[in-house]
Image: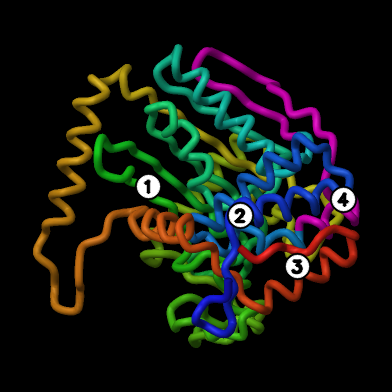
Amino acid sequence: MISSEKTLSLFSQSNIANFIESSFKAVGMPNRHAKIVGHLMSEADVSGADGHGVFRLPGYIRRIKEGGLNLNPDIRVEREKSGMALVNGDNGQGHLVMKFCADLATKKAKKSGVAWVGVHHSNHAGPASLYAKIPLSENMIGIYVAIGNANHLPPWGGTEMLLSTNPIAIAVPGLSEPSIILDMATSVAAYGKVKTAAQRGEQMPEGWMIDRQGQPLTDPTKSKDGFLLPIGGPKGYGLALMFGLLAGTLNSAAFGKDVIDFNADFKTETNTGQFVIAIDIASFSDLDTFKSNVDNVYRTMKNSPTLPGFDEVLLPGEQSYKKRMDRIKNGIPLHDELLEVLAKIARDLGIEQLKIT
């Protein structure tokens, strides 16, 4: 089924997940692991995180081929108390490592009320919301923070790339309204959006990046000539710094000058740091009462009168929820430029081409 736009084709989530799974199997990833990663990556696509789904497959495959990723990691707990754990990801695929951490945090929070699980020697794991939503599925609040896998920001007022986009996601469940899910980078735009714009031949809006003379940079193919801007100026810089200390330094993971640019170096271990927090709502409040109160907040925000130029008030995660509903029904749109890259992967690996829904 071809969409009305000439440059887009529509695919089911299951077909994308199966293609990703087949690709990883073809380069030696164990079947069970390939299935988990395929599902999580396709979850990014169906939720509208286009820069973190199948778009990332070529880079992951290249990293595996060049020896930068451990296909048989011993993901294990190194330090542990009732409400925390420190995990060694053993340089495994980030999706596998973070699912392990999020599942562990959720399990621990059922007993301790709150659990914090950090990790070192992980890898890029896709959109932050994937892992905040794992505790959410168990009626918990989920929080996820990561060190980005390349430095794209200088400290406020500086010019040396010492910080990444260091994203955060917070997921809070409602009763009958959609869950409220914040998923954001500490930069104005995530670097994945820059990469997808470059692949599609699109220009970036002013305000995403500036060059080293402080002038707006709108050509994504020249992103190496500039840097991303933090949200809120020095406040965004402060958040990126503190998230780096918590997800990186606290976990003995890479931060600052130690961060490996996984867009350019496919051989060196990234030692990526992340953490997940699970908060058991029932330990603080009656669960249904809390969810009902969240619904009330949701409706109050939605019913706020709008400024000129705004059709409605949106809550965090609402656009992603709407995209998810549409894409489950109608399919996930992929650009021709990406499809050409995926077709080459299929030929190179000797697997079946991605099937159009």
At 60% from the left edge and 66% from the top edge, which residue is drawn? 152
Location of the N terminus (image quadrant):
bottom right
| Label 4 with label 2: CB-CB less than 8 Å | no
| Label 3 with label 1: CB-CB less than 8 Å | no
Q: Give, as a three-letter code, the residue at label 2.
A: Gly
| Label 1 with label 4: CB-CB less than 8 Å | no
Q: Is residue 1 visible?
A: yes
Mark 3 to mark 2 CA distance (whole Å): 24 Å
Residue indicated by mark 4: 26
Mark 3 to mark 4 CA distance (whole Å): 14 Å
Q: Which mark is residue 148?
A: 2
Most extreme residue toward the left, as rendered? 305
Rendered location of residue 118, percent (x, y)? 59, 32
Answer above or below: position of 37 versus 329: above
Answer above or below: position of 212 versus 341: below
- Name the N-terminal-most of marks 3 and 4: 4
Q: Which mark is residue 342?
A: 3
Mark 2 to mark 1 CA distance (whole Å): 20 Å
Task: Write the start and end of the magenta stretch as one range.
Answer: 60-89
Answer above or below: position of 339 versus 294: below
